Image (cartoon, rainbow, N blue to C red):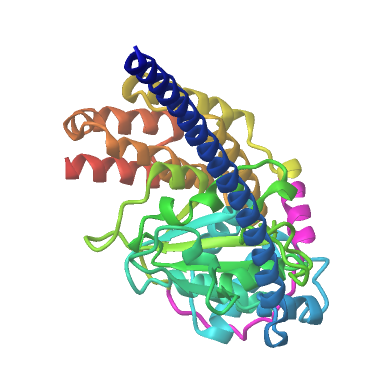
Amino acid sequence: MTVKLTGGLLSVIDYLASGYALFAIALILLVLIILIVVTLIRSGSANSSARKSDVAAAEKSVGRKRFDGLSKTDDEGVKSPFPPENDITFKDLCKNFRDFAAGNLKLYYEERDIRKFIAGMAVSHIIILQGMSGTGKTSLAYAFGEYLGNPSTIIPVQPMWKERTDLIGYYNEFTKRFNETDLLKKMYEANYGKGLYITVLDEMNIARVEYYFAEFLSLLEIPDPQKRLLTVVSDEWSDDPKKLVNGHVLLPENMWFIGTANNDDSTFAISDKVYDRAMVMNLDAKAERYQVSGAQKQFITYEKFSLLKAEALEEYAMTARNKKRLKQLDKFLTDNYRVTFGNRIMKQINEYLSVYMSCGGDELEALDDIIAKKVLRKLGSLNPVYIRNTAENFLKFLDGLFGEENMLECKAVIRRLALNA
């Protein structure tokens, strides 16, 4: 009997002991969880304080700012090279620039090529200069910067470029400074300056344009110029440049991007996304030399250039006859090739014609040029056999609509596509 009582008592004691053990284990786990949470919170706070401390230390490091070049522009400002030309017209601008390039730089261009260049600038902030090597693509953009008294920024594109940091630079965590490129410095300067700024992307299609230039393409599509903010850094320091707001710099209205392109086996094809937003100019042959005494440099403000464009749009609107012709051409292309103009291209056509005529050119000549480059280029993606079989009918249609002596560039494109089919 005594044995049974003792065994039962021991069982009760064991049961109670196991319950306390489980409770103790649960309590220990709870305490551990609380300690881990508290440690993580303290660690995050410490890291945040450390980051702030690192930023503060970097700001004070040897008394240097992380944006040396941009801060220098803040300190020195931008001065006009000489008084602006207020009475100039687009026609004067074309003639004076051509004479300046020939007389001062020994660079020769046809009158119509200068008109195409200026009219292209009035339509888009992206211009693509195509043609054989040695025809003066880079030189044309360089010469225009010299004429304005504001040298063009020449940027040789590299084959490995893939993102915007290749264009504007990057922040170096080791030196605590931003590696500023010439383009970033010029963009920042243009936000202070009143003149025209030219950036040349030399051999732009040696890398994929839609990769490294993607953010610029998107920003230029924003209707409000004041919202075209380019991300430079992800944070903000107390001594950052004045016009760098929350790590963003404004993509200035007075800056143009002019890309030179060679079409060979060593380059990438330029996508429709880029072509649709840009104005294209073909330089296929060198112009004849001519004697001229030269012309003086002329500083032209962006405000004046915009005013000249507005005046051209008002004074040189497309004639009713050519509007009718354009509708007929659009219908023909839609019915036969499923190719149409679209709102963006129609806007470009209207602006291009007005400014080209303001530069002293002919309306049909301008229409021929922009239709060939902006519309008929799309035929290259269609079935080549179909293009070859329908080419003759298309040529007859153009002769009947515009006359045999007109639309020569368009006809040349059609013949070239049919020949290469």
* Quadrant of the rendering where the N terminus is positioned: top left
Q: How many marks?
A: 0
Farthest top residue in view: 1
Q: Residue at x 55, y 64 (%)?
A: 114
Residue 289 lies in the magenta-colored region: yes
On the rendered structure, is 288 left or right of 42?
left
- Residue 284 vs 307, above or below: the answer is below
Determine which quarter of the picture holds residue 65.
bottom right
Q: Which residues are magenta?
A: 288-312
Looking at the picture, how far across and down is residue 23, in whole percent? Answer: 51, 30
On the rendered structure, is 15 left or right of 346?
left
Looking at the picture, how far across and down is residue 357, in whole percent? Answer: 63, 50
Looking at the picture, how far across and down is residue 180, in whole percent? Answer: 58, 74
Q: Residue at x 67, y 50 (%)?
A: 228
Residue 337 lies in the magenta-colored region: no
Q: Nearer the viewer, residue 347 or 275?
A: 275
Q: Residue at x 54, y 80 (%)?
A: 102
* Quadrant of the rendering where the C terminus is positioned: top left
Looking at the picture, how far across and down is residue 208, in whole percent? Answer: 36, 55
- Residue 342 vs 214, above or below: the answer is above
On the rendered structure, is 79 left or right of 17?
right
Q: Is residue 95 visible from the viewing direction of this image?
A: no
- Residue 277 vs 258, above or below: the answer is above
Q: Nearer the viewer, residue 420 or 47?
A: 47
